[in-house]
Amino acid sequence: MEKNKLIIKNGFIFDPLNNIEGDKKDILVESGKIVDKFSNNKDIKEINVNGKTVIPSATDIHSHVASQQVNWVRLLGSSNDKFKEVWGGLTLENIAKDYISMGYTFILEANVFPSLAKQTIFNFQQMPVLDKAMLLNISNLWPLELEFQRGKIKEMAVFLSDLLSKTFAFGFKVYNPFECEVWNFKELRDDLSTQGRLYNFSALDVYENVVKSVESLGLPHSAHAHIEGYENAIGKKNLFTVLEKIKALNLEPDVKTNLNLKRAQILHLAHVNSYSIDGDNTDLINFLNENPNFSADLSFIGFNQINPIITSDRRLINSMFKMDSIDNPYKLISSAVEFEGDSFVSMRSLHKTDYKACIIWANALDLALNAKNRYQLSLSLNFPNYAKITDIPEIITWLVSKEARENYMKGMNDKFLNKNVLLSNEKELSFPEIVCLTRANPAKILGLGSIKGNLGLNSDADINILDINITDTDLSKEYEKLKSSLSNIEYVNKSGKIVKKQNIIDTSSNGLIFYSEGQVEKEEKSLIMSRKEEFYNKYSSIFYDSYQVSIDKNALRKIDCSSS
């Protein structure tokens, strides 16, 4: 780490995790960290930001940016002029530049099969500046069959910890458990509590045992869940089935890291606005308000001309590509990864005239505006499924201004305009609440709140400087000023280095790959792992050790009990 020193003077600071809302203060940076004083007074660079706003850099808690499926999107889009125009080919460099331009310095790849982790690590290394992490999708992992069936949490935790250490992953995703049975029986289950056709356990058993194992390991981030049937009517029923099951466990977070600010949740829900297709979020809002040990991200729709769709949700794909349908103009790539699950890639267009798309759009706003716990929800885009990163400034105007969202709603589906949850909602979020949604909350939910998403002492010096005085701006009426300042962030500082200054982005530095292993009881590890290795030798076409990722350790940052 460079020992460069920087002082950001006279800015209006917004730092919710440290209870700072608009105070005029200086920020001192040395060796990539925020400090209270410099080691000496030599070679100090100064940025005077008088009349401007200073906030932490943003974190994306749920994205699809570095996986084999993204390569397939590029393949499908290579002959599509509209895709190339809107998405710039979705190249790794363009993705990184868009994130940096919008003030982001940390992103989470939310769905990686263990055997494809090498591809993700390779892609991470081609993405400049940003810190990155990934979640392993273990919901269909056959070697865990006995643990899912019998609830053998200690054995499962040992295996999962070793899997993390081999792949350098950050945590785990629960995603349509054992839905891959459809390859055998050509049908999707309708009840998550019933046992599978091939396996002597239910989807609910998988959710329960992954949550328990993550807490046993004490990982920074909780189990991260995609519930079966999102964007379909059955999704809402499935969502509450899972929520009530996990709530009944009466678990408390048991994070085993040295970081002071730990997560509060035992389960994180991905794109939670995509489940109430009826447009009624009342029960979900009440559940979240009454249960602070659950968190969620809100995936906002940007209504782009064309969107990639990257998913492992077969029900969603079936609804998009019905067997008797000849209307879908886009091709589909589908695959099954041995032992691990399914994945699908295609394209679609989310139009403002599409009733269901409008409902999902409104759900995100409804949930954000009615949440009582300001640290429970995070802004996301399910990137690139729902919106472009560069749509974020406009999305934020809908949250801070009723006028802005009403203006945007013009031209939406007539049925939606006649009846939707936003018609009588006068609420508007404050700027500190926006900082929570985009910065403080995703960092805290990931278990990184002590080093990301805040401007406190010893946190990473990931800082945005906005050319606007928020303390003197009526965001409800002057939302275009906020949109302009977020669209043209004046400075982005990453670990003490200026990576964006006005319109110039410096991509010469590399971020780190965050990973964790958790803590396990070592006594029986060798016996447990020898059994798992034997399972792979007997039933798999690959050896278990082939999961091992080779990478320069200087490119990694481990988050555990020794983290700082």
Image (tube, rainbow, N blue to C red):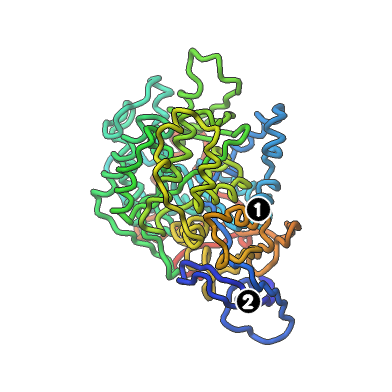
Mark 1 vs mark 2: which is more N-terminal?
Answer: 2
CB under 8 Å between callouts 1 and 2? no
For the image, the number of numbered tags is 2
Residue type at tag 2 = Asn
Whether residue 39 is situated above or below residue 70 in the rendered picture? below
**Quick check: 81 left or right of 51?**
right
**In x, y percent, where is residue 76?**
65, 29
> What residue is disc 1 on?
487
Residue 530 seen in this snapshot: no
> What residue is disc 2 on?
10
View extreme (bottom): residue: 40
Of helix, strand and loop, which one carries label 1?
A: helix
Whether residue 503 is situated above or below residue 52 in the rendered picture? above
Residue at (35, 60) in percent of width and height:
521
Judge the density around disc 1: few (<14), some (14-19), many (≥20) Cα neighbours within 10 Å. Answer: some
Q: Quadrant of residue 339?
A: top left
Residue at (60, 58) in percent of width and height:
105
**In x, y percent, where is residue 22?**
53, 70
Of helix, strand and loop, which one carries label 2?
A: strand
Residue at (57, 68) in percent of width and height:
460
**In x, y percent, where is residue 295?**
39, 52
Residue situated in front as seen by the camera: 324 or 300: 300
Give me the C-alpha separation between circle 1 and circle 2.
22 Å
